[in-house]
Amino acid sequence: MSAEQQLTRGIAQLQLALGPPEVDKLLRYLALLAKWNQVYNLTAVRDESRMVSHHLLDSLAVLPHVAAKRLLDVGSGGGLPGVPLAIALPRTHVALLDSNQKKAAFLRQVAIELGLGNVEVVAGRAEAHAPSAPYDVIISRAFADLAEFVAAARHLLAPGGRFVAMKGVLPHEEIGHLPAAWRVAEVIPLRVPGVDAHRHLVIVSASPAAAR
């Protein structure tokens, strides 16, 4: 099965409304990731089939749960999940934040080559980021544990906004260490085509009684 067939089939299994233009951009992104990975070590996954399942489809699986006007991907690395989400959500402003300058350079090149006008690349730490407006959704994939994630980016979240943490096995211990001002609003199990492992989304929001 070709990468295009695998991706198209996975998108159908996830019941996402993405067409040939989006599939083309996702595959072009994958090609850039594989090319730059030889020099910048962006991902430990090098097999093309696993890159489709563990990177593209894994990122796209969260799509129904990240509706936002402004979305921030903290610790974006090689652009996951931010780049696939930006391709799928062209009307959403997607900021890709990473403190590694080489990874930020790669992300800028991706935005240019794919014509992603809705993407902003931020080279720096979340704690130092000062955007023109806060974000409705702040997402991370393997960035930090929940308490560290919230502490680093809480000043960037709009009132009523949500943190979305992509996790493997449900992190009960991390949830237990969340500060009192924050609560787990929802835990969503995910089934990712081609990924035979646990996947969960942990949605965190401000506690209703907490003073902001």
Image: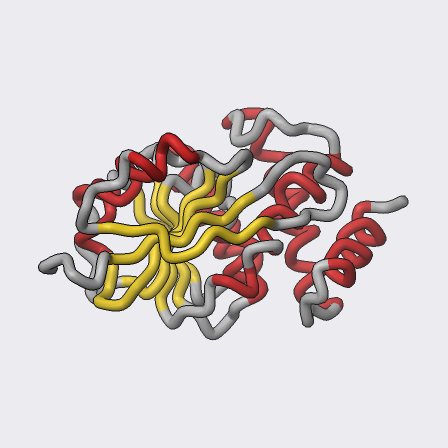
Please state the total of marks drawn on the protein image.
0
Q: Looking at this view, is 132 or 105 the one in front? A: 132
Image height of 15 relative to 130, above or below: below
Q: Looking at this view, is 103 or 2 the one in front? A: 2
Image height of 48 relative to 21, above or below: above
- The residue positioned 32% from the left and 65% from the top of the image is 136
- The residue positioned 52% from the left and 31% from the top of the image is 42
| Quadrant hosting residue 37 | top right
Q: Position of residue 153 (x, y in %)?
A: 24, 47
Q: Is residue 120 visible?
A: no
Q: Is residue 135 visible?
A: yes
Q: Looking at this view, is 184 or 167 the one in front? A: 184
Q: In the rendered image, which quarter contains the C terminus? A: bottom left
Image height of 47 relative to 134, above or below: above
| Quadrant hosting residue 196 | top right
Q: Position of residue 101 (x, y in %)?
A: 34, 34
- The residue positioned 68% from the left and 71% from the top of the image is 17
Q: Position of residue 36 (x, y in %)?
A: 57, 34
**Display colour scheme:** secondary structure
Q: Position of residue 119 (x, y in %)?
A: 42, 60
Direction from residue 124 to residue 175 in the image, left or right: right
Q: In the rendered image, which quarter contains the N terminus? A: top right
Direction from residue 99 to residue 6 in the image, left or right: right
The residue at the far left in this view is 211
- The residue positioned 56% from the left and 30% from the top of the image is 43
